Image (cartoon, grey):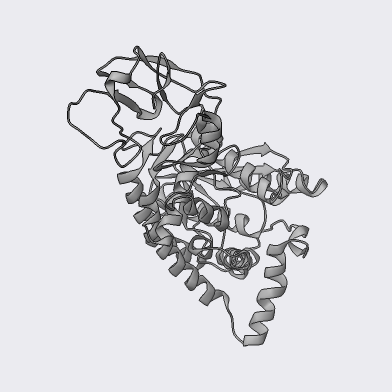
């Protein structure tokens, strides 16, 4: 089977693009992307494709970067492929970051900008089977779950990878057999990078010890892991569609900048879909899973156990907060705005996040207070109207039920482990003489 036939088989089986589509090629000038450019040039007319390309110059290798740029410009002219060139110099951005990781982030951002501006259907990157195997091993050694063991996906959103079933040496053989030049990145031979060590030292060593190739079996394991991950992800998406609430109110569009879910419902899920729910929730509000480790996910899930409260820092300025029955994902808690509203008797006051304080009258005898903190019964004859609902103030005191004296509201909230960001949002019902509830 020729290389073109191999690529088209992957395209058909994975439904990566259709006849008449427009494709933006990510071109570096190396073996993989150069071969991809020639392969797409070969099928362009038959598939009626509109082909364009983007080269990102990261300015990481001085004169060699200039050479890469000139090579890609010449390649695209010779193949009749419109080319755009962007520049972006990556720098590490905090712990766990790297130049390579930030270069990848910049590159994908430029590709998406170009795709959107040019109204192109798909972005094609030149990842091949060896890349996927290296990624699987890299993630395995980091302690990844099923998603990481699935390696590089064939498709994610608008990004497709039509070479993922082809080996690196096959692409090299294709270029050499047809006399097509390509660029060589000297940093690919440097073993200072984990990926290079896996490619240059670990895989050859394992194959030598076992006496057989391992990339095929690892690739098949990756595909099984990817299928499991897709199934678990579908369960998590369905669960969030039923239980997720944007801004704390029930609704279908849970993919909002703020998301609340019932904590104990999440705690009852099996661990695999529960972890995926947390990942989707973080990604939906923060737009990224950068820095979200398995340990972070499990700490969020632990917040869902009965009686737990607290806040866990996520990626960027986002956090997950457990308050009462809800687990909320969103931006950092803004300073609460003091509030005060009249509370008619009978009547109600609507607060933020869908909260409502209601008061009514009853003549039926009842224990005081009944079970649960969301509803109480008080002696109406002892009230000193008018009633108001307000936020706490410095110096607020109340007399807890059964206590010999009064306590500061602040101290009571601290003892009850109410999150700092929530203390100024809690509603107090007061009359002329002080705090009623």
Residue 129 is left or right of residue 277, and the answer is right
Measuring from the top left, give residue 387's x and y in whole percent: 35, 15
- The answer to whether one can see residue 50 in this image is no
Q: Is residue 362 visible?
A: yes
Q: Residue at x 51, y 71 (%)?
A: 219
Who's the residue at 53% across and 53% down the image?
A: 299
Q: Nearer the viewer, residue 381 or 415?
A: 381
Judging depth in this view, the residue of 383 and 417 nearest the camera is: 383
Q: In what quadrant of the picture does the C terminus appear?
A: top left
Residue 183 picture location, percent across and down: 72, 56
- Relative to 265, is 389 above or below? above
Q: Is residue 169 above or below residue 64?
A: below
- In the image, taking residue 58 as reference, residue 17 lies left or right, namely left
Quarter of the rendering containing residue 268? bottom left
Q: Is residue 8 above or below residue 433?
A: below
**Numbered marks: total:** 0
Q: Position of residue 76 (x, y in %)?
A: 62, 45
């Amino acid at each position: 089977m020729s290389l073109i036939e191999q690529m088209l088989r992957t395209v058909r089986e994975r439904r990566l693009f259709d006849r008449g589509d427009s494709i933006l090629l990510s071109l570096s000038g190396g073996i993989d992307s150069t071969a991809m450019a020639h392969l797409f040039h070969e099928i362009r007319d038959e598939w009626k494709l509109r082909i364009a390309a983007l080269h990102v110059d990261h300015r990481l290798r001085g004169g060699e970067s200039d050479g890469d740029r000139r090579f890609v410009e010449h390649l695209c002219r010779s193949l009749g492929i419109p080319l755009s060139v962007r520049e972006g110099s990556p720098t590490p951005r905090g712990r766990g970051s790297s130049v390579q990781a930030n270069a990848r982030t910049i590159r994908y951002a430029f590709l998406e900008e170009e795709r959107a501006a040019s109204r192109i259907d798909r972005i094609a990157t030149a990842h091949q089977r060896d890349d996927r195997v290296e990624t699987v091993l890299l993630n395995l050694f980091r302690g990844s779950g099923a998603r990481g063991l699935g390696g590089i996906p064939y498709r994610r959103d608008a990004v497709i990878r039509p070479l993922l079933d082809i080996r690196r040496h096959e692409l090299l053989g294709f270029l050499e057999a047809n006399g097509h030049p390509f660029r060589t990145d000297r940093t690919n031979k440097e073993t200072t990078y984990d990926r290079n060590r896996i490619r240059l030292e670990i895989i050859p060593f394992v194959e030598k010890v076992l006496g057989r190739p391992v990339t095929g079996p690892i690739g098949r394991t990756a595909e099984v892991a990817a299928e499991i991950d897709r199934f678990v992800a579908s369960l998590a998406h369905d669960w969030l569609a039923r239980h997720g609430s944007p801004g704390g109110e029930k609704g279908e569009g849970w993919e909002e900048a703020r998301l609340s879910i019932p904590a104990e419902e999440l705690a009852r899920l099996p661990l695999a879909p529960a972890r995926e729910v947390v990942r989707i929730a973080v990604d939906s509000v923060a737009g990224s899973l950068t820095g979200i480790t398995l340990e972070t996910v499990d700490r969020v899930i632990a917040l869902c156990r009965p009686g737990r409260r607290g806040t866990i820092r996520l990626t960027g300025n986002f956090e997950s907060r457990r308050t009462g029955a809800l687990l909320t994902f969103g931006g950092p808690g803004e300073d609460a705005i003091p509030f005060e509203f009249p509370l008619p008797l009978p009547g109600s006051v609507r607060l933020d996040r869908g909260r409502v304080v209601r008061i009514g009258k009853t003549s039926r005898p009842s224990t005081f207070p009944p079970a649960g903190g969301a509803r109480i019964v008080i002696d109406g004859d002892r009230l000193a109207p008018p009633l108001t609902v307000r936020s706490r103030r410095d110096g607020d005191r109340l007399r807890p039920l059964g206590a010999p004296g009064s306590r500061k509201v602040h101290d009571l909230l601290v003892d009850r482990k109410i999150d700092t960001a929530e203390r100024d949002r809690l509603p107090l019902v007061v009359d002329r003489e002080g705090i009623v509830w």
